[in-house]
Image: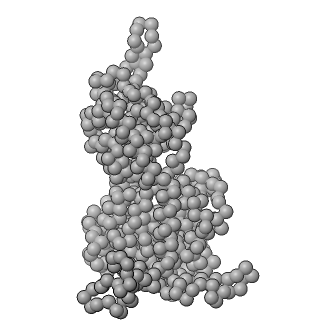
Amino acid sequence: MRIGLLTEGGYPYVSGDARLWCDRLVRGLGQHEFDIYALSRSERQETEGWIPLPPQVSRVRTAPLWTAEDDGVAYGRRARRRFADGYGELAAALCTAPEPGTPQDASEPLGPEADRFGNALYALAELARDEGGLVGALRSETAVRTLECACRAPGALRAARAARVPELLDVAAHVERVLRPLSLDWYEDDGLGSADLCHATTGGTAALPGLLARHFAGVPLLVTEYGVQLRAHYLGTADGPPSVRALLASFHRRLTAEVYRRAACITPGNTHARRWQERCGADRAKLRTVYPGMEASRFTEVGEAGDCADPYTLVWVGRIEPAKDLVSLLHAFAEIRRQEPKARLRIVGAAVGAEGTEYLGHCRALAAQLFPDEAEGVHAVGDNPVSFEEIGDPAVPDLAEAYAAGAVVVLSSVVEGFPISLVEAMFCGRATVSTDVGAVVEVIGGTGLVVPPRNPRALAEACLALLGDPERRERLGAAARARALELFTVEQNVAAFHGIYLEIVSHSPVRRVLVDDAGEPLPFGAPAETHLPGRWTEPGHLAGRPRWAWTAGGATAPVRATGQPQETVPAPERAS
């Protein structure tokens, strides 16, 4: 099958999000053909280029989100009226949406505002396709005035009513950036229209081309979120004018709900993300948890070597930033040193950005204050029990050696999505002490100790419990490695997506004409039933008597069934 892989700020660029797992997925599914449609986030990302691509990638099409030239499209009177109507409906849907923070129950029927937003979105997409672009119109004074009218209308959000012109300009500019994929020429029969399946590697803007491919050509959409984009937006816009935050939160909430509503399947990376998706309106029947796949081979030597590290050394590995809460870890280590003077703490990681660099300096100063250099005698050189190192240093040449350096691996974060460093420690067969944030409890599954976040005393007690019990450390480490090899490898990730691809495509009718090597059409190249959506593939139908032979009170046992009656799978919604 042909897969349209939709990315934002990641694959196939050298730097960015979701680069590694996308590359592993594409390489692991060599029997399929991939077309990559990538949205870049910065000029630097485009300058750095792409990673080497496998032969199953037939083509790559890119578009920038960080800049956009005016498309130069001059609308006529009818087109201007279409834009005003479509953008007016979109703005009205945003301004009359529930206040941010209002819970949304997926079991409740979708209200008229959901249809209003979706209809307006697709009306703008059709206008962009007919007229050749939408960038200039979204930047126009008409767009700002339309947004202002929606904010002043009766029933508008309370925070939006007080929006001033500069704030409306900020909102309109943000909406234009997010809706930039509407102006792309990716949706014709030689583009996403020819794909069997669109796979968006994240929600939000990356999934927007998939929505349009579904609208224009009936291509089914699969959405994968290892970090929920709506949650990231909420966390990233804590500051700013209330009107801007309210309008943008409403816009992203509506866009996310439309993506979840139209997707054939949604694959969260963990239960924590799954709960967020359900809270944001995703249908539980569409959710399938697929854990990230990680390369386990580079940790094999350390994992199979057993616990041969310094029994008094704690190791922390990760990206140094305030969310990792190294301050609490240092205070916890001060308590550990009082009860175990031989204990040492190795912090392995690099700071990212100005905020991370400043935080690293603060942690170094705190470590020097809490643990003055100590010497065993008057002629010895003092040594601090806390060390700050980076991967590539002589003592830690690679990531596996970093985890091998200690008997216990510690995670002290206050905010965490899927804890990659924790999984790497499990591959290495290390006992772990972690804070109860994000998907930590789901990942370790009882193979490590978990304490509340921002609680140095509890963190210290858990570390001391493992440092003083070598047999328990070895038992937990072995269990952690077995769990990681079962759930978090590349092989299980690729196999899961392979099955989901087949399941979605089997419930979707064939849309493109099959041709031979000479380009001539093959009228019987696909079975007749592949032109029908969904129901012919239902397990319940194949297992025994047809639907029309079932009793009125419910499904009865099939006449020729050899086991229990199979549960019927509801057919997906027909392509619009």
Residue 89 lies, in percent from the top left, at 39, 79
- Quarter where residue 288 is shown: bottom left
In this view, which residue lies farthest toward the top? Answer: 378
Q: Residue at x 64, y 89 (%)?
A: 523
Residue 70 lies, in percent from the top left, at 58, 69
The residue closer to the viewer here, 455 or 170, is 455
Residue 554 lies, in percent from the top left, at 27, 86
Residue 472 lies, in percent from the top left, at 33, 36
The residue closer to the viewer here, 190 or 450, is 450
Q: Residue at x 55, y 66 (%)?
A: 5
- Quarter where residue 543 is shown: bottom left
The residue closer to the viewer here, 125 or 201, is 201
Q: Is residue 426 left or right of residue 390?
A: left
Q: Answer yes or no: is residue 569 visible.
A: yes
Q: Is residue 201 left or right of residue 255?
A: right
Q: Is residue 165 above or below residue 120?
A: above
- Image quarter (top left, top right, bottom left or bottom right) of the N terminus: bottom right
Q: Is residue 66 above or below residue 90?
A: above
Question: What is the total number of numbered labels drawn onto the structure image?
Answer: 0
Q: Is residue 44 left or right of residue 564?
A: right
Q: Residue at x 52, y 32 (%)?
A: 396
Q: How is the image coloured?
A: one colour
Q: Answer yes or no: is residue 167 visible.
A: no
The residue closer to the viewer here, 466 or 281, is 466
Q: Is residue 55 above or below residue 337?
A: below
Q: Is residue 201 above or below residue 368?
A: below
Q: Residue at x 30, y 72 (%)?
A: 106
Q: Is residue 265 left or right of residue 297?
A: left
